[in-house]
Image: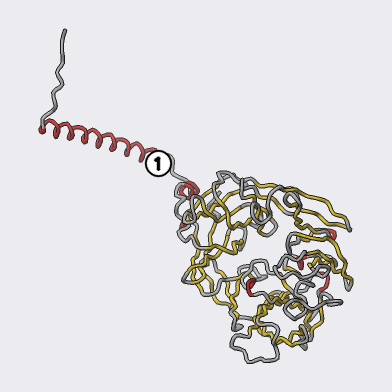
Amino acid sequence: MLFTEDVAPSGKNKTSAKKNVVTILIAVLAIAAVLAAVWLYRNPPEENDRVLGDPEKLETVQLSRTITSIPYMSTDFDNVFYTADAAGNVLFYEFDGADFVELAETGTMDLSVPLSGQQIPAKIHYIERDGHICGYGVFSTEGSDDEDVYIYSFMMFKVTDLPAAYAADGRCLLLAHTDRTQAYAQEPVWEESYIVNRADGSMTRFLSENNRTIGINGGMREDFCMITDEALTATGKSIPFFSSRNHEQSQNGDTPIDIYTKVDNRETSAAVSVAECYVKPLENDAFAFVRETNNGFETVRYENGEESVISSFYAGYGTSYIRSGDYILSKEDGRVYTTYDKTVLTPQDYKINPLVFAVSPDGKYIVMGGTVANALDYQIYVYNTETGRSVTYTETNYAEHGNMRFINDTTVMFYVINVEGFENVVLDLSAVR
């Protein structure tokens, strides 16, 4: 029988063996590199492949990242934004594709707003373009010597066009709310609305104050005739608005909300106990809204005094499902539902706990911001509904994100709150295709 004896190699033999292995590895890598270069030469990567192949870099789609003390807020005009502080200073900016450039205002108007037996001074800074107007103002008792205003310490104002069916030459609409927490809200709820005669500054009520009672704060009830910017987009005479006038006001903010409609000078109860001050005007004076149920919530269509359920959901509204504009997102599986019909969008490679989201005006892009593994693992997820492609970017700033909205069909914007202020981020998604 032949026996083979295992003999440990000497130090010299070990060195020689290592050299041989290294030489072989270098040769293999060199050959692989040459083959890869040849393949790339024959198959150059497309622009989209470069974006999708480097998902960790948000900079590949970033147009702008600007830190300000006050966030840029959207106006009624495309690419035009504003900032407003408690001292009443209002500035306008236009986004030129790379930066926010300060824009000269068209003018100002000084108004005296009648409310709760007082006259609230309002200085409105506005932009006027192609027959349309949009402007803002702030009243605050901080640093003010106006002793005549004692019920309200803060009021936010907006001047805009009257709804199409109520438009009149020389007239515009003044909106106001008294809630400081809504100063930077993407979808503010306006408590007051007035028709302004621009010739002399006189005002009349757009929504009636008949039978309005005193609220908890000592002023007229702020939940009596509430309205939103989207409600004012209604094209017909019927304008939906919100009121809790038939319910006793609660101090903890859970007073039931009903929807009314204004038709000329008539105001009629329409839908009771809705989930929030959200309404989507539709054709033929119809509208869609959201109502919570015993098992979850439902989207509902209201038309000609009749209600019909659009879709039913069996989970918590505002927790398991969150809304942005006219879309509702299921945080569990990433599906996105329209509020006004049965359209459902189903993103692919969905692996995120979304905290904010937005859908492009043309419905092509869905963007979500949220965490994955933990609070420090913040991601921006983008899905192209036409091609089914998705990209996930790492967001290095994982502080609170807010006001995610589209500037146009391919450009999305949001802000991040941190110790330096508001970091305004603008992304170009056109490469995600």
Residue at the top extreme of this rendering: 1
Q: Secondary structure at mark 1?
A: helix
Horizontal side of residue 27 vs 308, given as left or right: left
> Picture quarter containing residue 226?
bottom right
Q: Which residue is painted at 63% across and 83% down in the image?
A: 140
Q: Which residue is painted at 49% across and 68% down in the image?
A: 418
Horizontal side of residue 403 vs 165, given as left or right: left
Q: Which residue is painted at 71% across and 67% down in the image?
A: 253
Q: Position of residue 324 (x, y in %)?
A: 66, 58
Q: Position of residue 423 (x, y in %)?
A: 50, 67
Q: Which residue is painted at 88% across and 73% down in the image?
A: 265
Location of the N terminus (image quadrant): top left
Q: Which residue is mark 1?
A: 40
- Amino acid on which disc 1 is placed: Leu
Q: Residues within 10 Å of mark 1 (few under 14, many from 20)?
A: few
Residue 25 vs residue 186, the one in the foreground? 186
Residue 142 vs residue 338, the one in the foreground? 142
Q: Position of residue 234 (x, y in %)?
A: 79, 65
Horizontal side of residue 336 vs 302, given as left or right: left
Relative vertical location of residue 109 with respect to residue 242 in this rendering, above or below: below
